Amino acid sequence: MQSCDICLSSPCKASCPNAPEPPVMGHCKMCNDELRYDYNYFRDTNDDIFCSRECADAFHGITEEEWSSDDIEEGDYYD
C-alpha cells in the first residue's frame, strides 16, 4: 500500500485532508445534526442522543434560573 503524498502515512492520519470522513453514528434528537464517530455525544435516560448538552437541555425544556427576593417573601420553596 502506498503512502499518502500529504501526510506520508498509510492509512492517512485523521488530520490529513485525504483521510476518509468518520462514519455517521446517528443524528441529534433536537437539531438533527450528524453525530459522527469522532465526536462525543450526550444520551438521556430515554436513550435519545444529542450533539450537545445545550440541545439536550432545550429538548427537555431545562433552563437555568435565579432565585428572586419575591421567592423568599412569597415562601416559594421547593423540596
Image: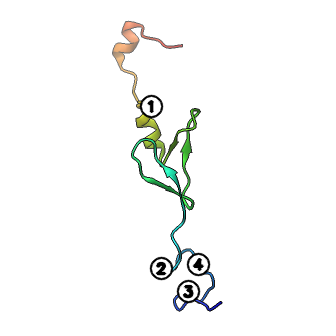
- Could you tell me which residue is drawn at 59 percent across and 33 percent down? 45
Which of disc 1 and disc 2 is earlier in sequence?
A: 2
Tag 2 residue: 17
Please say if the residues under marks 4 and 3 sit with CB atoms less than 8 Å apart: yes
Tag 4 residue: 13
* Numbered badge on residue 60: 1
- Mark 4 vs mark 2, CA separation in Å: 9 Å
**Mark 4 crowdedness (10 Å alpha carbons): few <14, some 14-19, many ≥20:** some
Which of disc 1 and disc 3 is earlier in sequence?
A: 3
- Mark 4 vs mark 3, CA separation in Å: 7 Å
Secondary structure at badge 3 equals loop
Residue 4 percent across, percent down from the top left: 56, 89
Secondary structure at badge 1 equals helix
User: Farthest residue in the left direction?
Assistant: 70
- Could you tell me which residue is drawn at 37 percent across and 9 percent down? 73
Q: Quadrant of the N terminus?
A: bottom right
Q: Of 68 and 28, which appears nearest the observer?
A: 28
Tag 3 residue: 7
- Could you tell me which residue is drawn at 47 percent across and 47 percent down? 52
Amino acid type at image mark 1: His
Amino acid type at image mark 3: Cys
Check the image and report above or below for 25 versus 55.
below
